[in-house]
Amino acid sequence: MGDVPEISFTSPLVGRAAELTRLTGVLERARGGEARAVLLAGDAGVGKTRTLDEITARAAASGTTVLTGHCVDLGDVGLPYLPFTEILGALAADHRFAAVVAGHPVAEQLLGGRTDGDVTGRGGGEGGRLRLFESVAALLGELAGVAPLLLVLEDLHWADQSSRDLLRFLLTRGALQRPTAGAAGPRLALFASYRTDDLHRRHPLRPLLAELVRLPVVERLELRPLPDADVARLVRAQRETPLPDATVRRIVERAEGNAFYAEELVAATDSTPDGVPSALADVLLIRFEQLSETAQQVLRTAAVAGRRVGHDLLRDAVALPEEELETALREAVGRQLFVPGDGDTYTFRHALAREAVYADLLPGERARLHGAFARLLAAGDRGPGSAAERAHHYRESHDLREALAASLEAADHARRVGAPAEELRHVETALELWSAVDAAARPAGVAPVTLTLRASAAAAHAGELHRAVALTRSALAGLGQDADLELAARVRYTLAGNLLGVDDLRAALTHSREALSLIPEEPPSATWVWAAATYVMATARQADLVPGALRIGRRALKAAEELGVEDARADLLITMNRLDGTNRRTPLGRERLREARDLARRAGNAPVEVRALFNLSLGCFESGDLEECLDWAEEGVERARRFGLLSAPYPLELRYLRMLVQYTLGHWDACLREAGESAASAASPAGAYLVGPRLYVTLARGGLEAAERAALDLLAQPFDWMGTLVAGVVLTDAAGLRGDPAEAVGRARSTVEALTDPGGVPDVTVRLTALALAAVADAAVRLRLAGDAVGAERWARTATDLLAGARASAREGEAGLAQGPEGQAWLARAEAEWARAVSGPDPAAWEKAVAGFAFGDAYERARCRLRLVEALLAADRGEEAAAEAAEVRREADRLGAAPLRERLDELVRRDRPADRAPGSDRAAVLTARERDVLRLLALGRSNRQIGEELYISAKTASVHVSNILAKLGAAGRTEAVALAYRQGLVAAEPTARG
């Protein structure tokens, strides 16, 4: 029997664009008389058949005759020439080709099932075989002479010897041989597929492949595993109802780029979500079951070790003589179940194959082998990571005491190397094991409450903020009546800090106040200092509590300095910087933040250090110092990366801020690249808002619907302050671009309401208000032009209400101080939009808005310039308007902001006063290519003639003509030419002298 049965798929092709392009190129060359062959290689299930189906469909649609033959696994009883017999059978059954087949009687003999010497050569020598091969080649050549021909052979790894011989002849001497000089070659392409994972060392196809790939007409194309993004698309396409993101990520991880595996895992999500589906397991185990008993035992043992195992460890666990082990390993490698790796290791070719073998073990056998590996790992020096392996093996062998100790050791190692997600997993495992281990056997100096606190810290550092809150609440519930007061205070201020992370300010204040009340201020203690630091942070946004918080904070700073608790002192300096008026935007405030950074770094407290760097970076952004903002953000991200904190709250915000600055400066392509990298590395839902800058670019470049969908997805998740902010900005701006002022106002107000806390309105209020005011002003202007004074007045009142909130936010932001240049620029835009809504466009207001965004916001400055063009045109200041329009046009083209460019073109097209100087700004509206087309249009050229002269297609020329008519406001080509002459856009051609 063969190795793996035929695999069928149910969903459309996903990915493979590069491979299809390459195959299409081969077909194009073949249609031009350059016969070619492609050997399509790939593992079972990776998508060879799907790719061939797609390319054959395209070939057939283009008029190519497609002939397909399949090789079938028939074990030792093979049918000679099976795929070619299938092809000839299809030809004979088709009335279009029956006569051609009949004209080649030797080839036709295959259809009669002849196996005598005349056909196969087994009894009559090679003469009969040669005549057969030549006849088949001639038949294919004749067919290719009538129409381009694509010959497809699937599953060559199952091909019989006769079929392999015929294929060799066709590629070396037959149908694909090169023509003589000057003669046209056959219009024929041959695509043949085979499974790479079926080609063991002695497989009979191997020598043929080695021979064929050296031929100039043959190329090899290997289908690699699909990228994760394509597998995710495939997975989501399988279900009408969406799968949870976590399920999709798990399937993508397990499938390892194999389309068939992904489909099977999706189909089994309801029944065996974490196991290997039975149908898939059957496929995976077929090749395993063909191994010798010894090789099977080696793989069973290796499956217990994991995906990869070292040679020495495997040898000790399987307890075989070295020679027998090597023989078994050679067999497993030859069957491509095992792959040799670096460092004398072996790896299962696919993780699911390992899972299938592991699942096939008996329970007792599994526990015994886990115990053996645990003891071997404990007995030798297996490296720093072996504690995690020991913990796993001890647990699976039911030695819970050793599993607990090893889990704690593994957690310590994860913390040392900056891997908080792994530390969390090991600590939670220890917590699960705690009650199952006798008290006398538990590690000394460890208690469940402190262990739970440690887990909550790891969860917070890994970005699992809600998990951190749940764990700390568990620790609080675990405190007994006689609990140590310092421990009780630690639990409460830790819980308060975690609650601040999920924006539950009221509960954070309650628990921080309780923590502070449990510990006396005198004598000073580190626990009291940290309790005070947390309380001061929890009160920072509540104006009525700030005076008391300042008093406590100053006493805590003094105590921290006396005790030498430098990281707590750093944390207090950061918070106090916000409360006592120094502010992160001022030179004094930044100096204090640099001091906090240095203190935290000396103390080795990376989270506090990164918090200081975040505030330094954000202060620069708010002040309009964008380049310095990037420097601080880069330092913060690198420090977070060094300590494994990239998914913690402040590093996430630094990553967002870095992309936001790139967006603001107009470095949109760099912003998109980093956004893609951030999405690929997102480790927790807490960082979902990192998509924000990408959505801003998408919206500005015309992807309105895509941006709105993504923003709504953010709102569908558990409340997150930053996620709500990003979604609000996108949805408010999108509503305005759609011309829906009611939706824009509603989105702005609901977002501000969701983000407002006891400390006052958020700084982003001014930006949201300005975006909503743009939509309101558009509506008021439209109604005023339509003569609806009542409707225009209604929107003018709405504009006035909105402006009051913007002014309050810019005048007294979250820190109780006036916002910096960024906030003031948005206020200037809001003021200008308000004036436009109430009385009409005001050039002075828009000039102020343009100047406000000069700190570096390229896109918003261009948007304000567009409004300035409108205001200048309304004031009949045409020359100034033309100069500003040129700036908008240049910036819109640089950014790729097509909607902005379109709005500018529409504005200039709409404004055509009769006394405008000829060609004053019309030529600027037309692109260089459109001016070339207009010149030829004036000469009476047709679209085809224009295309030939400019080396573009007639269709493209037609598009340019349509654009020209629209921009000139012309009803047809003749009117467009007349307008062009009248406005000086084209000059009269000189008359030739006789």
Image: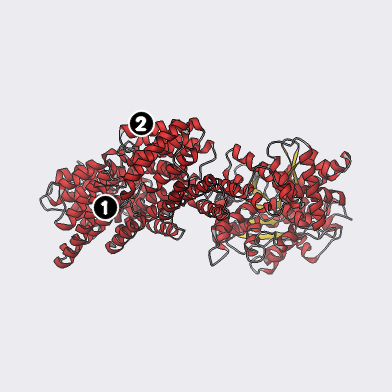
For this rendering, which residue is in front, 922 or 992?
A: 922
For the N terminus, the image quarter is bottom right
Can residue 925 be seen here?
A: no
Q: Is mark 2 on a helix, strand or loop?
A: helix
Alpha-carbon distance for marks 1 and 2?
33 Å
Q: Which of marks 1 and 2 is nearer the N terminus?
A: 2
The C terminus: image quadrant: top left
Height in image: 566 above or below 693? Answer: above
Provide the residue designation for mark 2: 591
Check disc 1 and give the amino acid type.
Answer: Ala
Q: Name the residue under label 1.
A: 770
The foreground one among 927 and 34 is 927
Q: Where is residue 510 in the image (x, y as percent from the top left)?
A: 43, 53
Q: In this view, does 409 lie to the left or right of 327?
A: left
The location of residue 405, given as percent across then percent down, is 70, 44
Q: From the viewer's perspective, is 71 left or right of 95?
A: right
* SS type, badge 1: helix
